[in-house]
C-alpha cells in the first residue's frame, strides 16, 4: 500500500512560552519546525514526541503549528529530520528540526472555516494535547487541518492563475457558447448515462472495499459466462462503459492492466513478470498481492488529495485507469481528461505553478476552471460539459500557438485534418468567421493570387483588356489582422503541397518565421516587395491606392506578416507532391501528423440512433487489422492507411445493432476498394490487384467471425 498524506499539529514552545509573532518569524526566517532531542514526562519517563518527529513524520506531511489551542500556521515537511547545533535560546531554540514550506498563516478565512467546523462538532476550541500530535480519526481539530490544507492549496492556485483578464473573458464567452449550443437531448442523455454508470460502479466499489472482487470480475472475455458484472468486467467497465460520459482513459494496451486474460480464455498475461501464459492460480496470486490492495486503498479514501497521492505513487502501469477510479468517486474534483499531453497543455496555459504529478495538475486545472467559469459542481451534467469544453479548448489551442505560429497537419486521407481545423477555429474564434480564411492551393496558384500582382480587370471602352495591380488573398488577410491587433487570425490552406510554394510565397517566406513577425506600431520586420515601387507611384497619382499597401513606413510601401496571424497548412502525404516542401519551407513549420484515430471510430460510430452496437470492439479491431495489412504486409506504409472518417460510414450502412460481415463487405466495396486499388497499382502488376484486394477484405472481416 502506498504512503498516505499524514497530518499533524505541533507547538514550538520551550519552557518559556513564545509569542505568536516570534513563532511566525521562525517559520518565515528559518523555515523550520522542531523540538528538543528528548525530555521526560511528569513521571520521569521519556516522551515519544522526538521519535515521532524524527521517524514517523514523513516528507510532504502537513503540520499545523499552534500556540496552545490557537492556530498559527500550516506548513509542509520538505526534508528529513536533523540536529542543529547553532541555535538561539531566545528564538529558534530547538535542536531537532525539519525543513518546511509555509503553506499559509491563520487569518480571517481560516477563522471562518474553523468556526464552521467547531460548530459541526459542538465545541468551541481545537484540541491541544502535548507538543506533537498525529491526526488520526474524525474530530474538529483533524478535520480543520485537512480543510485548511485544501483552502491553502486553493488560495495558492487562485493567486497563480496565468491567464490574463482578456483571455479569461474570452474563455468565459466560449464556455457560455459551448453550453448554449449543446442540444437538450444530449444533456438528457448525459444525465441518464452518468446515473447508470454510477449505479453500476457501486457494484464494483462494494466488492473492492469488501475484498470480494474476484479475478474474473477484474479481467475476462466480453460475453463470457463468468463476465457477469456491468460492462462484463472491471477493466472493460473502466475503459469502455464509462467513456461515454467520463472520457477515455486510454491505458495503451490491455496488458497495462497488469493481469489480462488471454484470448484462449484459460491463460493469463502478467505484465511485470513478463509471463505470457500464466495459470489462473498464478494470476490470482499476483492480482491479490499487487492489485486488490491498491484498488481498495484508492476506493476507500474520500480525500481527493490523498487519492491523488495514491495514484501518482502507484507502480501500476495504467495510471490513467486509476485516475478514472478516483474520478468515479469524486466527480467534482477532477477533469474527465487523462491524456498527459493535453493536461500538461491546460496546466501550462491556465496556471503559473510547479506541480509535478499529472493527476495533481488535473485537479488544479479543474479547481481553476470551476472558479473561472462558475461551474455548478452539484450538476453532474455541467461537470461532463466542462471536461468536454476544456478538451475542445486544448485541442483547438494546440493547432497553432504563439511559440509555433506555423503548422502543417499531414497524414492519410480521411483522418479529419480539415474537419478538426474548421471545428477548432470556429470554437476559438467564437463563431466569428472573419477571423479565419480557408482556401485550397492548386498547381495554377501564383504569387499574384497570394501576395500581389498585375491581373486582368475587365475590358476598356475601346475593347482592350485592362490590367490593374491587386492584392492577393494572404496580403489582404494580413492587412485585416494588422488593423485588429487585439485578436488572433488564422489563415488556413488545404492541400498546401499542390502549389509551387517557393513561387507562391516569394520574398515573403522569411516573414512567416516567429522571430520575423511584424508587431503592431513597429517599423521592424518589414520588407519591400517587387511591387512596392509601383504601389508608391499609384498612391502619388491617387491616394485611394493606399489600400494596396500593408503599411507605409517613412513614405515607403512595405509588407510584413503580423504576429497575430497563425498559418495552418494541411495535406495528404500520400500525395507525392509533398516534395514541394523544400528544406527552407519545412523548417519554418511545426509538423503534426494525423493518423487513423480508432477511439474516434468507436466514439462516433458506436451508436445507431442512441442504440449501441453490440460488437463495436470487434469492428474497431477489424479496422486496425485492415490498416496493418495495408501498411505492413502490403508494404505501402502508414501514409496509405485509411483514416477514421472512412470507417465511420458504418453507422449509415449497418441497419441492426450488430455489425455483420455483410456490412463490412458493403463498406469495403463502396468506399475502400476503389481507393486501395489505385494505391496498389503503383506497386503490383495489374494481374495481382484483385487477389490483393480480396485478401484485404478477408483481413477486414476476420475479427468479426
Image (cartoon, rainbow, N blue to C red):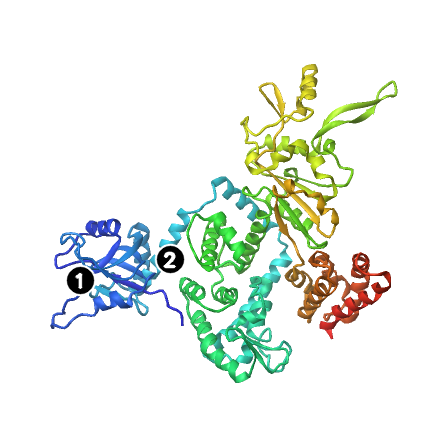
Would you call the spot at circle 2 few (<14 residues within 10 Å), some (14-19), or many (20 or more)? some
Q: Secondary structure at mark 1?
A: loop
Residue for point 57% across, 31% down: 518
Residue 670 seen in the figure: yes
Residue 69 seen in the figure: no
Across and down, in percent, residue 235 comes to: 56, 72
Q: Quadrant of residue 683?
A: bottom right
Which residue lies under the disc numbered 1? 36
| Picture quarter with the C terminus | bottom right
Residue for point 32% across, 70% down: 137
In the image shown, does 681 or 129 lie closer to the viewer? 681
Which residue lies under the disc numbered 2? 150
Q: Determine whether, in the image, residue 136 is placed left or right of residue 46.
A: right
In the image shown, does 204 or 182 lie closer to the viewer? 204
Across and down, in percent, residue 577 comes to: 74, 46
Residue for point 32% across, 62% down: 59
Q: Determine whether, in the image, residue 366 is placed left or right of residue 77.
A: right
Across and down, in percent, residue 535 comes to: 68, 21
Across and down, in percent, residue 167 comes to: 51, 42
Amino acid at each position: 500500500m502506498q504512503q498516505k498524506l499524514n497530518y499533524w499539529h505541533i507547538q514550538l514552545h520551550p519552557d518559556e512560552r513564545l509569542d505568536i509573532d516570534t513563532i511566525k518569524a521562525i517559520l518565515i526566517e528559518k523555515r523550520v519546525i522542531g523540538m528538543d532531542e528528548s525530555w521526560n514526562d511528569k513521571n520521569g519517563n521519556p516522551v515519544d514526541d522526538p521519535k515521532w518527529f524524527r521517524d514517523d513524520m514523513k516528507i510532504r506531511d502537513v503540520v499545523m503549528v499552534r500556540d496552545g489551542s490557537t492556530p498559527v500556521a500550516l506548513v509542509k515537511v520538505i526534508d528529513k529530520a536533523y540536529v542543529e547545533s547553532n541555535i538561539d535560546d531566545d528564538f529558534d531554540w530547538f535542536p531537532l528540526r525539519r525543513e518546511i514550506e509555509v503553506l499559509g498563516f491563520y487569518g480571517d478565512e481560516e477563522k471562518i472555516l474553523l468556526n464552521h467546523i467547531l460548530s459541526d462538532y459542538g465545541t468551541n476550541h481545537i484540541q491541544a494535547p502535548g507538543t506533537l500530535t498525529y491526526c488520526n480519526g474524525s474530530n474538529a481539530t483533524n478535520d480543520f487541518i485537512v480543510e485548511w490544507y485544501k483552502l491553502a492549496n486553493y488560495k495558492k492556485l487562485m493567486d497563480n492563475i496565468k491567464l490574463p483578464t482578456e483571455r479569461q473573458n474570452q474563455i468565459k464567452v466560449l464556455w457560455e457558447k459551448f453550453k448554449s449550443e449543446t442540444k437538450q437531448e444530449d444533456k438528457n442523455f448525459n444525465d441518464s448515462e452518468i446515473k447508470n454508470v454510477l449505479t453500476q460502479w457501486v457494484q464494483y466499489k462494494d466488492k473492492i472495499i469488501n475484498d470480494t472482487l474476484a479475478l474474473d470480475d477484474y479481467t475476462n472475455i466480453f460475453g463470457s459466462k463468468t463476465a457477469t458484472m456491468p460492462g462484463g468486467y472491471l477493466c472493460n467497465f473502466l475503459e469502455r462503459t464509462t467513456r461515454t460520459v467520463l472520457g477515455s482513459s486510454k491505458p495503451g494496451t490491455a496488458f497495462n492492466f497488469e493481469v489480462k486474460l488471454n484470448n484462449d480464455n484459460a491463460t493469463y498475461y502478467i505484465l511485470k513478470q513478463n509471463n505470457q501464459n500464466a495459470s489462473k492460480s498464478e494470476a490470482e496470486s499476483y492480482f491479490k498481492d499487487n492489485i486488490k490492495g491498491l484498488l481498495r486503498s484508492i476506493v476507500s479514501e474520500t480525500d481527493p488529495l490523498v487519492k491523488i497521492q495514491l495514484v501518482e505513487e502507484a507502480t501500476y502501469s495504467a495510471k490513467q485507469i486509476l485516475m478514472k477510479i478516483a474520478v468515479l468517486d469524486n466527480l467534482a474534483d477532477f477533469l474527465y481528461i487523462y491524456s498527459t499531453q493535453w493536461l500538461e497543455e491546460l496546466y501550462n496555459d491556465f496556471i503559473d505553478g510547479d506541480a509535478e504529478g499529472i493527476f495533481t495538475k488535473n485537479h488544479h486545472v479543474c479547481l481553476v476552471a470551476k472558479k473561472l467559469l462558475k461551474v455548478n459542481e452539484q450538476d453532474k451534467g455541467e461537470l461532463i460539459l466542462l471536461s468536454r469544453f476544456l478538451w475542445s479548448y486544448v485541442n483547438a489551442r494546440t493547432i497553432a500557438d504563439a511559440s509555433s505560429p506555423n503548422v502543417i497537419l499531414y497524414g492519410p486521407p480521411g483522418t479529419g485534418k480539415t474537419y478538426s481545423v474548421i471545428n477548432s477555429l470556429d470554437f476559438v474564434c467564437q463563431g466569428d468567421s472573419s477571423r479565419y480564411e480557408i482556401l485550397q492551393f492548386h498547381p495554377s496558384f501564383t504569387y499574384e493570387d497570394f501576395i500581389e500582382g498585375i491581373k486582368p480587370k475587365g475590358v476598356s471602352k475601346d475593347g482592350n483588356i485592362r490590367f490593374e495591380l491587386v492584392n492577393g488573398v494572404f496580403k489582404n488577410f494580413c492587412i485585416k489582422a494588422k488593423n485588429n491587433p487585439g485578436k488572433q487570425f488564422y489563415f488556413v490552406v488545404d492541400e498546401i503541397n499542390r502549389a509551387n510554394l517557393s513561387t507562391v510565397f516569394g520574398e515573403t517566406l522569411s516573414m512567416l518565421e516567429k522571430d520575423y513577425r511584424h508587431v503592431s506600431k513597429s517599423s521592424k520586420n518589414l520588407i519591400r516587395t517587387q511591387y512596392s515601387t509601383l504601389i508608391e507611384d499609384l498612391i502619388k497619382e491617387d491616394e485611394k491606392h493606399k489600400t494596396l499597401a500593408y503599411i507605409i513606413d517613412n513614405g515607403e510601401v512595405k509588407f510584413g506578416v503580423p504576429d497575430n496571424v497563425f498559418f495552418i497548412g494541411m495535406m495528404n502525404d500520400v500525395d507525392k507532391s509533398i516534395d514541394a516542401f523544400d528544406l527552407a519551407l519545412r523548417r519554418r513549420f511545426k509538423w503534426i501528423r494525423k493518423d487513423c484515430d480508432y477511439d474516434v471510430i468507436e466514439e462516433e460510430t458506436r451508436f445507431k440512433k442512441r442504440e449501441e452496437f453490440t460488437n463495436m470492439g470487434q469492428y474497431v479491431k477489424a479496422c486496425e487489422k485492415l490498416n496493418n495489412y495495408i501498411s505492413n504486409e502490403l508494404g505501402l506504409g502508414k501514409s496509405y492507411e485509411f483514416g477514421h472518417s472512412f470507417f465511420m460510414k458504418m453507422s449509415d450502412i449497418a441497419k441492426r445493432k450488430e455489425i455483420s460481415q455483410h456490412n463490412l463487405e458493403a463498406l469495403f466495396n463502396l468506399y475502400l476498394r476503389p481507393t486501395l486499388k489505385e494505391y496498389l497499382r503503383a506497386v503490383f502488376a495489374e494481374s495481382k490487384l484483385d487477389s490483393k484486394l480480396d485478401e484485404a477484405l478477408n483481413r477486414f472481416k476476420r475479427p468479426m467471425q
